[in-house]
Image: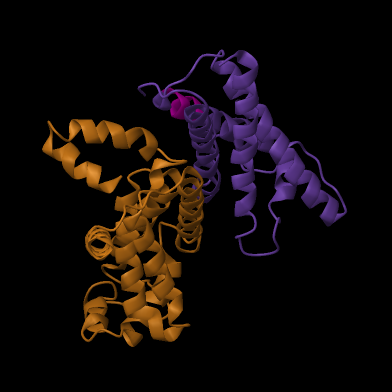
Amino acid sequence: MNRSDTLRRGLLAGIFASLVLALFDFVTDGEPGNGFPGVLHWFGLTMSDPTISHWVGLLLLIVLGGVFGLIFGALQRGSPVTTGRALLTGLALGVLWWLLFEVVLANLTNHASSLLSPSFGQFLSSFPLAALFGVLLGAIFIQWQGQHEPRRPS
Amino acid sequence: MSISSSAQKQQRGATTASEESAAAPPITLSERSSTGLALLRILVGYLWFQQLFWKLPPTFAGLYGYVVRESQHAILPGYGTLLQHTFLAGCPSLSSPVGCTAFVPLAACVWTAELLVAISLLFGLFTRFGALLATILSVQLYVGLAYTEWIWTYGMLVLLALVFVAVPAGRRLGVDLWLAPRLRSAAQRHRLASIASWFV
């Protein structure tokens, strides 16, 4: 497996993991995709047209997923990775996703409560899903590696 | 010759048919089917995850109305009485849990069990254990609330949970992918690992 393969798999794994997060917005009470504008709010962006806001939010979520996937791929340095390491690296990136978007950026753009006193409900609604993104990123990556290469002990 | 040959063929054919009926060929799920089932597992986990938010601690007040309804409409004789003497013990009102003696600790147990189900199914972590817990919780909901809503609502919840008890859906897109082979190899040496391996 060369470096460009690893990056490509990381990118696709990140996109698929973010699509799973996007899927949740279609099984949540209210109109489908209501959570997508929230992705724009991380960066302090608001759009008056709700349809455009939904689509741009979805696109941004997928792009961010892809970027995290590329980071994941870059961390593997082109060598085959074990299942445990892939899941742990993914989880670490998920926690980084949560810290960066749900804590730091959301606080900087004043869309969340204080950095030091997040409410329990706010933590519960964001942290597990960010961690899930990371675990999915690692799991998808390792499954594709398993399908394209001879299995290594994990 | 032709007669004996055809008789032999018939006999061979009959033997093969009986062998086939005696041992049905094993079913192997393809990689796509396994991943599809894992995706369904994640969505069912999200279903449980969403339901944590209308009964958040420390009061779990959202749960109270449902427990009252269960105590009034349970389909199992005695179940309503059981709820009245546990969850609803000492409750002065049917509209608010204020003053109940045991509601908060018992509701905390229910909420924690639902959180475990959500984490287990979302992350594919001891998925069959989570699915078993989901089955128990769903059966409880069916017993208490089946006739207060569309009867299949909670029936389907039970059936969905049973699917993930039967199929190891956490071994794709989940932590069980890493856990399963480890527990299987450790099961030969440790009894605890052997028990734990049932749940992945």
The colour applied to the residues of chain B in this rendering is orange
Q: Considering depth in this image, is B58 or A124 the residue closer to the camera?
A: A124
Q: Main secondary structure of the magenta part?
A: helix
Residue sticking out furthest to the right: A48
In the rendered image, the vertical position of residue A46 relative to residue B181, given as above or below = below
Residues rendered magenta in the picture: A85-90
Looking at the image, residue B129 sits to the left or right of residue B120; the answer is: left
Q: Considering depth in this image, is B96 or B146 the residue closer to the camera?
A: B146
For the question of whether residue B198 can be seen, the reply is yes
The x, y position of residue A105, in whole percent, is 68, 33
Q: Residue at x 31, y 84 (%)?
A: B74
The part of the image, by quadrant, that contains residue B189 is top left
The x, y position of residue A53, in whole percent, is 81, 49
Q: Considering depth in this image, is B75 or A150 the residue closer to the camera?
A: A150
The colour applied to the residues of chain A in this rendering is purple
Magenta stretch: residue A87 in it? yes
In the rendered image, the vertical position of residue B77 relative to residue A132, given as above or below = below
